[in-house]
Image (spheres, rainbow, N blue to C red):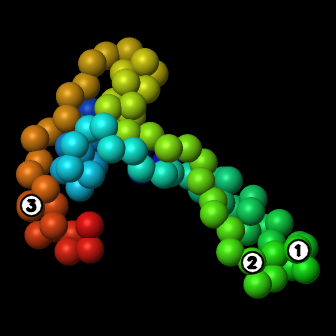
Amino acid sequence: MENMLVAGVTCYMALGAFSAVLCGPHLKIKVILVDDLGFIAAKAMIEPEVFIAQAIDIIGDEVSVAGMQKEFESVAGYRVTRAPVPWWFMVMMVPYA
């Protein structure tokens, strides 16, 4: 989630990139805060007998690009739009996207 702590042109480009990779503003992605991930990792180290040989699904929230945009606007106090970034451009820039 920390990747979205940006403003101005950076936010405009980030929202556009996420939208392009997800092929639209309404597909949801799973995100997590670094602090939450660190808490789970620390707990696994403190109590290894509980976590040994376990697969753990960790998710903090499930959001869409449109949802990210709406939340950013409510916090920032101004409207932000997505940069029109074609999905094929993102694939060229990030081959594993």
> In this view, which residue lies farthest toward the top?
77
Residue 94, quarter of picture: bottom left
Q: Residues within 10 Å of mark 1 (few under 14, many from 20)?
A: few
**Which residue does the image show at 13% across and 56% down from the upper left?**
87
- The amino acid sitting under disc 1 is Val
x, y percentage for residue 68?
39, 34
Q: Earlier in the sequence, mark 1 or mark 3?
A: 1
Depicted 57 relative to depicted 81: above or below: below
Q: Going 37% across and 39% down the picture, which residue do you hit? A: 64
Decide if residue 26 is on the left or right side of residue 94: right
Q: Position of residue 3 (x, y in %)?
A: 42, 50
Q: Crowding near pointer 2: few (<14 within 10 Å), some, many (20+)?
A: few
Read off the residue under disc 3: 89
Residue at the disc numbered 2: 54
Find residue 8 and report its horizontal and vertical position in percent: 26, 33
Q: Which mark is residue 50?
A: 1
